[in-house]
Amino acid sequence: MKAELEDASLARYAGRFVWLELDFDRRANQPFIARHGVTYTPSLFVIDPSDERTTAMQLGGLTLPELQQFLIRGERGVMTKARTPADAALARGETHMGRGQLPDAIAAFRDALRLGGKSWPEHDRAVASLMWALVLRRDRPPCEAIALAEAPHMARGEAFTRVVLAGMWCANSDASRKIFEQLAGEAAGLPSTLRDHRFQLYQQLMVAAQRRNDRATLQKWGDRWLAELDATKPANDDERSALDVARDDAASLLGQPERVIPALMASQRAMPANYNASLRLAQAELAAKRYGDAVAACDRGLVHVTGPLGRSWLLTTKADALLGIGDRAGARRALEQALRAAKEIGVKQARERNVASITKQLGAIANGTSNESDNRRK
Amino acid sequence: MKRLPILLLLATMATSAMALPMIQDDYAKARAEAQRRKLPLFIEVWAPW
């Protein structure tokens, strides 16, 4: 998303907004994050500063043209009233999303679609917004049903891609998974698809192949994803870091961590003060059973980590690596530190999930039943 | 976050780092400036993972 935000073509908007970036894992930002129910990054907002009303809200990345439309929509919401009842309902849904009020947002998006009808210019965007609200609420049956009804007939653009992605997450039967896999393959090949979303499509396609033990298809999507990653030259540290996240995910799903370790080591050398680079390298080394290297990478990351979520993640990764070595006492100490960090996480869901998981791991160590955890939570 | 349920989103960058004058991690300051200048406030909540 930062690529789009840094694009020179946005210079004409520079004086029309005040611009703010908030790091999800920084303590100072937790009041805003809690107030607006943010659980997903990136989340984008346009807010009326006079009353803090959200006039545009977006979960996930946007293409540059979409970002420009988003800004115009948000600006219009501050300066003027919505144009039609359907537009007003859509704006209301975005306001509710901006406050983390998912049931109200879902109701408003449904109203917008009912009022706007199929020919409403914002129809596809409203469907995509409704789908993401349903996904966040983990309301799978309507999510699956709406995606099945809408996606095949939608114009092939970013809204289509978002609906297909939601459908992949919500699909609950082999028949619907098959339909969404076909649509996801199509979406992944669209020039309009945002790179973030294409990577998520690859990921979902690999998960789907893994579910039915289709090794050839898993390998095909994994190879395509890694080839694209290797062909992308990062413009700066942020992009390098983002690519490494994807690299780690692709290799993990393929079960081939060794394949990405050289690139992750290069990133660690290029960004020695970036804790995320250390964490990603540690995770690949852990998966490759290079436990001593993984512990060292975690220790490097811990020197530079900036927030409790990142800290607890590094420490649980370190604990897993120490267990691999057979150092149970060291693993317990790392988990105790991780637990202290996890209790400081600002976002309630992430805090509770991490505290529960680490507590369970500590219990397993105490009972002598511990193995490496699934250390890929966030 | 960036997958759903584990969602990860990826950051990319390109040209012109000075196109948008971003305030970092200070909502109160940004809101006050937006009120003073009577401008909408754009916010990106991001994460390094």
Image (tube, grey):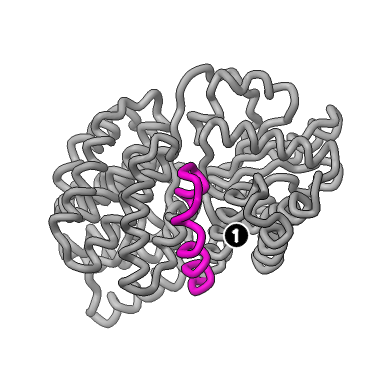
Residue A164 drawn above or below residue A237: below
> What residue is shown with label 1?
A130
Q: Quadrant of the C terminus of chain A?
A: bottom left
Instruction: Report the front residue among A317 and A118.
Output: A118
Residue A40 drawn above or below residue A107: above
Instruction: Report the front residue among A82 and A242.
Output: A82
Magenta stretch, main secondary structure class: helix
Q: Amino acid at mark 1?
A: Leu
Quadrant assignment, res A152: bottom left
Instruction: Return the x and y of residue A127 as percentages of the image width and height.
Output: 58, 56
Task: Give the chain of mark 1.
Answer: A
Instruction: Report the front residue among A82 and A345.
Output: A82
Q: Is residue B42 left or right of residue A177?
A: right
User: Residue shown at 40%/29% (left/top)?
Assistant: A237
Q: Secondary structure at mark 1?
A: helix
Q: Is residue A18 left or right of residue A260?
A: right
Instruction: Return the x and y of residue A37 as percentages of the image width and height.
Output: 64, 58
Q: Bounds of the magenta span?
A: A139-162
**Other-residue count near label 1 (Cα within 10 Å), few / some / many at <14 / 14–19 / ≥20:** many
